[in-house]
Amino acid sequence: MKNKNRSEIILKGVISFLIAALLYNFIWNEFIINPTASTVLEKKDGEQVVLKHIDDKQSLGIMRTQDGYYAYALSEGFLGWSITDEVYLPKATNKEKVSSTNDTLIYKKNKELDVILISSLNNSISYFESYDENGKEVILDTNREQNIELHYGYPEESLFGKLTIDGYSSDDKLLYRE
């Protein structure tokens, strides 16, 4: 009789542990909480090419898909990280050698971040520069992959007016202006 009660208690304990483990791993971690900004991006289609920390509670993530790039505003909240906004940039094509967008991402607590994305197939362009109407320059980083370059940047302060994007050759000759 005692062995039967002991077996029942052990079986109930094992079943309770398995149920708790399943709830934690498959419900809590998958649907409720994202412990890192990278975890959020893993759930999106495409390949992560950039993850930049803006500050302790905000990051910029860029994913490459078959037809372009998505920039995501990632914000940390009470239940972990989440996507609060996104911007899409189509890949440059043979017809349009350069594709670009300048948009504002909105984070939690309405914090805004201007983001510049440029996709280029033009091998003659070595680097891009961008600046607003007041001449404030935005430094652009570059990610190179399979004949396509992604140039991206974000200013620390909001941009003013129209943005100008210039593409230069390796000998500093202006080849592209938008």
Image: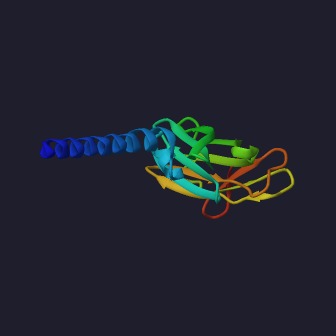
Residue 42 in view here: yes
Residue plotted at (68% across, 48% down): 115
Q: Position of residue 118 (x, y in %)?
A: 62, 47
Front position in the image: 12 or 172? 12
The C terminus, quarter of image: top right
Residue plotted at (54% across, 51% down): 37
Q: In this view, does 156 lie above or below 23?
A: below
Residue plotted at (38% across, 44% down): 25
Residue lying at the far right of the rendered structure: 134
Residue 168 location, quadrant: bottom right
The N terminus, quarter of image: top left
Residue 89 location, quadrant: top right
Residue 127 in view here: no
Specify whether 85 is left or right of 150: right
Q: Where is residue 15 in the image (x, y as percent from the top left)?
A: 27, 41
Specify whether 167 is left or right of 123: right
Front position in the image: 28 or 132? 28
Front position in the image: 170 or 151? 151
Residue plotted at (13% across, 46% down): 3
Specify whether 86 is left or right of 157: left
